[in-house]
Image: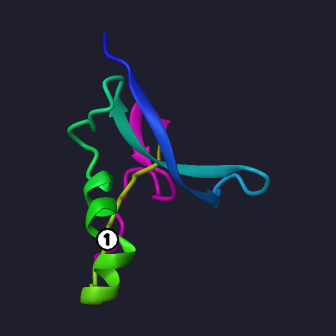
Amino acid sequence: MSEVDLIPVALFDDPFRGAPNKIALCETYHSTNKPTASNFRHLARKIFTSENCDKHDPWFGIEQEYTITRTIGNQIDWPYGWKEGQLPLPQ
């Protein structure tokens, strides 16, 4: 068993459940204060310091994607908002 600490770094209004609910984005660390293998936010924080941004004027983007599903039929997970049994149109 391993313990993972969640360190909140940003707080947003929850667009799904509405006020007063919030969604917290977190960094993840082992109890030894070592970042977990999937925690890349700590690297960005080290790189994008005020000093580095003033010197280099960086452009960057970070993308996180999530799929919210619901169970339909015989316990099939289907993306929320899609018609049952149908795929969305190409984007």
The residue lying toward the viewer, choosing from 66 and 38, is 38
In this picture, residue 59 sits left or right of residue 82: left
Circle 1 residue: 48
Magenta includes 62? no
Magenta includes 81? yes
In this picture, residue 70 sits left or right of residue 34: right
Q: Quadrant of residue 74?
A: top left
Residue 25 location (% of width, % of height): 49, 51
Label 1, secondary structure: give it.
loop
Quadrant where the N terminus is found in the figure: top left
The residue lying toward the viewer, choosing from 66 and 50, is 50
Q: Quadrant of residue 32?
A: top left
Residue 91 makes an appearance in the image: no
**Residue at (27%, 87%) from the top-left corner?**
55
Residue 12 makes an appearance in the image: yes
Residue type highlighted by circle 1: Phe
Above/below status of 2 relative to 55: above
**Residue at (73%, 57%) from the top-left corner?**
18
Above/below status of 27 relative to 66: above
Which stretch appears magenta?
A: 70-90
Magenta residues: mostly which secondary structure? loop
Residue 11 location (% of width, % of height): 60, 56
Mark 1 neighbour class, 10 Å CA radius: few under 14, some 14 to 19, many 20 or more: some
Residue 58 location (% of width, % of height): 27, 85
**Residue at (38%, 51%) from the top-left corner?**
85
In this picture, residue 9 sits left or right of residue 48: right
- The outermost residue toward the right is 20
